[in-house]
Image (spheres, grey):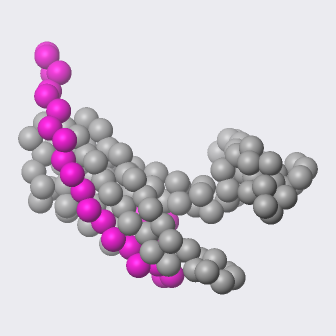
Amino acid sequence: MECTVKWVGGMSFMAETGSNHALLMDGAPEAGGRNLAPRPMELLLAGTGGCTAFDVVLILKKGRHAVAGCEVALTAERAESEPKVFTRIHFHFRVSGSNLRPEVVARAIELSKEKYCSASIMLGKTATITHDFEIIETPVPTGA
């Protein structure tokens, strides 16, 4: 995996990934940024949410469960002093589908947490990570 990060002025940086995608990062105004893009630590948190949501959907699909949607709301706390690592992260999953059993959703989340989500496993070295979830019943579309 590769990534190049270039300073583009002020406190803005452009990341170019090995898969040929680009994204902008910017700092807070109090740090000299112009608030034009997410902060790097916000992207770290977002990437972690994407990593675990990907796992949960893939696990449910592979188990042939009727998953229709997956959303993860993350809340994080950081250390007060440098380095301001994440110290607590809570993941709240909202999984929608038809006839999804709580034990199946819980198992998918647990597999992501313990085995598959490298991002949350890394962050778990400095942060206490907690999870909860809700299931939203979504009717199966007609003709499915």
Residue 128 lies in quadrant: bottom left
Q: Give left or right: position of 28 versus 92.
A: right
In the displayed structure, 139 sits above or below 106; it is above
Which residue appears at 62% of the width and 62% of the height?
41
Which residue appears at 27% of the width and 52% of the height?
59
In the displayed structure, 69 sits above or below 73; it is above
Where residue 16 appears, as percent x and y from the top left, is 74, 48
Where residue 21 appears, as percent x and y from the top left, is 68, 41
Outermost residue, top side = 143
Which residue appears at 30% of the width and 53% of the height?
93
Count of numbered circles in the view: 0
Residue 84 can be seen, yes or no: yes
In the displayed structure, 10 sits above or below 75; it is above
Q: Nearer the viewer, residue 143 or 129?
A: 129
Is residue 124 on the magenta stretch?
A: yes
Where residue 27 appears, as percent x and y from the top left, is 76, 57
Is residue 46 on the magenta stretch?
A: no
In the displayed structure, 98 sits above or below 31; it is above
Outermost residue, front side = 30
Outermost residue, right side = 9
Q: Nearer the viewer, residue 1 or 8?
A: 8
Which residue appears at 39% of the width and 57% of the height?
52
State the quadrant of the N terminus: bottom right
Give the residues drawn in magenta, as a range: 117-144
State the quadrant of the C terminus: top left
Q: Give left or right: position of 83 versus 101.
A: right
Residue 5 can be seen, yes or no: no
Where residue 69 appears, as percent x and y from the top left, is 29, 38
